[in-house]
Image (cartoon, rainbow, N blue to C red):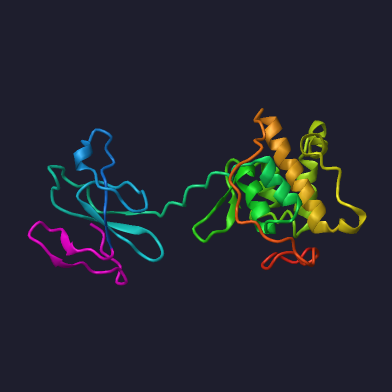
Amino acid sequence: MPSEPASMPTARNSTSTGIPSRAENLLEVMPISSSTPASNMATCSDGIWLAPAQLALRMPHGPRFCRSGPTWRGVRCAPGRWLPRRPPPAPDPYPLSRALLEAVLADRVSDRFVCELIWPRLGYAPDGAGTWSAGPAAGDVWRESFPIEPQFIAERPPAVALTRSIAKEHKQLLKEQLGFAGYRIGELYPRRTRRATAVNWLLAHLAERGEPLPETGPLPELLQAPADPVAGHPGDRPVQ
């Protein structure tokens, strides 16, 4: 059995069963075997499945170490071993609706929220630190050109790439589905025009999958349109 790192929390007050009675830094885990009866299962808080009769030491950083214990509910545990951290699952894309896309065009949501409507649909997913990275589902062009969080509103290259990725037959969906004819002359700021591109891409994404655009759906807390459309909302990145 591998030795425990010096920085690992130490279990205290072990009982005669060998399982620590105080487990502030321990997680009871569930069996991996699909044949194990459900009565032998215990839920691990982060959803990781480990061998039964083990306690996983939660560490602030790095892998988790599994310490073997005695038989537990009639099941003998496996030897201790190291287990790598698993990245959090990709969140479901925020549901699209006409009301939501019109809020994007009206500048009622942050620039990052607009990007987060697109990233999961392009195959990006957040890592443990909250940074979105291109995953296996992202196309080669996106993975190579923008491996991390393409800023579709703040930066020109990702905005151009997004525009070029919209098929010709879908480039008029803004007008056809939303009746959006474009911004007025005094509203032609990069932040606004790139929002129009983002909405066009989202409409094209639905069209390519044959999915309808609902009239209504969940909405985030809507913001007031910024007084300075160039600067945008608090927290928006400077536009390049």
Q: Is residue 135 left or right of residue 45?
A: right
Q: In this view, does 79 lie to the left or right of 70?
A: right
Q: Is the magenta stretch mostly helix, strand or loop?
A: loop
Q: Where is residue 135 in the image (x, y as percent from the top left)?
A: 58, 46
Q: In this view, does 196 lie to the left or right of 224?
A: right
Q: Where is residue 116 in the image (x, y as percent from the top left)?
A: 63, 51
Residue range highlighted in magenta: 1-25
Measured along the vertical axis of the image, is residue 57 above or below residue 89? below
Camera-side residue: 34 or 191? 191
Camera-side residue: 235 or 228? 228
Name which residue lies at 33% across and 53% down: 45
Camera-side residue: 58 or 166? 166
In the picture, the quarter occupied by the N terminus is bottom left
Name which residue lies at 23% across and 63% down: 23
Camera-side residue: 237 or 230? 230
Q: Position of residue 123 (x, y in %)?
A: 61, 44
